[in-house]
């Protein structure tokens, strides 16, 4: 997702913030692959509940969570999100959690789409994005193409099936190109897992 910042920071500060955000996004969400693939169901479930509970505490600015995660909020949150810090992270964690409850280990597809695709599309769209997509004010063609390519490569490695990789990556990239409500972090993992399940 190619985001154009709040205008408070200079262009280079804005790009640096997005690079930091997307590296964190990629690494943090990729960690969900460990409980999904290797934990017994009850332990994976407990992990999700604890992480989502702490995440909710940060969003609601409940102590001590707010203070514990203030360094992440200060260095990684966009100005426009400071009223509800870590809300997008909460949507992402919920999207992956619901995918896990419905699809089990296939939720890994949702992790890949969200962690890899969303990170690469934002990074590329922010730095090189010039062509706005007609149906979105914040997304670019370059970001959407980066989403498709990065997800295609990862899904091809994961599922070892070209047809499934093309279908999941292209339809997920198309969906991500819209300004989704409440948030693409919630919808994309569920959508991608549903596609993987159906094919």
Image (cartoon, rainbow, N blue to C red):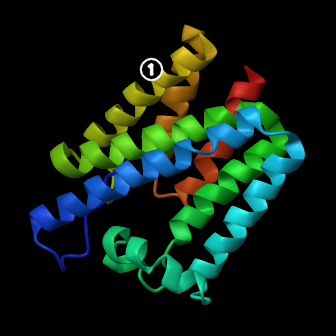
Count of marks placed on residues: 1
Which quadrant is the C terminus positioned in? top right
Q: Is residue 148 rendered to the left or right of residue 56?
A: left
Front in this rendered view, residue 23 or 193: 23
Q: Is residue 61 rendered to the left or right of residue 153?
A: right
Q: Is residue 104 above or below residue 197?
A: below
Q: Is residue 153 rendered to the left or right of residue 49?
A: left
Residue occupying the point 60% across, 86% down: 64
Front in this rendered view, residue 66 or 3: 66
Q: Is residue 147 above or below residue 15?
A: above
For disc 1, the marked residue is: 153
Q: Residue 55: x and y, percent?
A: 62, 71
Q: Residue 17: x and y, percent?
A: 25, 63
Front in this rendered view, residue 98 or 67: 67
Residue occupying the point 60% across, 90% down: 63
Report whether residue 136 is seen: no
Q: Residue 52: x and y, percent?
A: 69, 66
Q: Residue 169: x and y, percent?
A: 51, 28
Front in this rendered view, residue 192 or 153: 153
Residue occupying the point 64% across, 57% down: 93
Residue 72: name its quadrant. bottom left
């Amino acid at each position: 997702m190619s985001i154009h910042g709040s205008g408070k920071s200079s262009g280079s500060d804005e790009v640096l913030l997005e690079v930091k955000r997307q590296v964190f996004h990629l690494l943090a969400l990729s960690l969900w692959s460990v409980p999904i693939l290797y934990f017994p169901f009850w332990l994976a479930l407990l992990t999700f509940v604890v992480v989502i509970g702490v995440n909710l505490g940060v969003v609601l600015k409940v102590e001590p969570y707010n203070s514990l995660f203030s360094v992440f909020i200060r260095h990684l949150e966009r100005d426009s999100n400071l009223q509800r810090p870590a809300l997008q992270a909460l949507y992402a964690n919920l999207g992956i959690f619901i995918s896990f409850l419905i699809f089990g280990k296939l939720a890994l597809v949702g992790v890949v789409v969200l962690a890899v695709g969303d990170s690469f599309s934002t990074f590329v769209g922010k730095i090189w994005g010039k062509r706005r997509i007609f149906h979105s004010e914040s997304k670019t063609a370059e970001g959407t193409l980066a989403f498709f390519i990065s997800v295609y490569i990862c899904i091809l490695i994961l599922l070892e099936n070209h047809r499934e990789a093309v279908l999941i990556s292209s339809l997920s990239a198309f969906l991500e190109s819209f300004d989704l409500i409440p948030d693409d972090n919630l919808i994309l993992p569920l959508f991608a897992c549903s596609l993987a399940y159906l094919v």
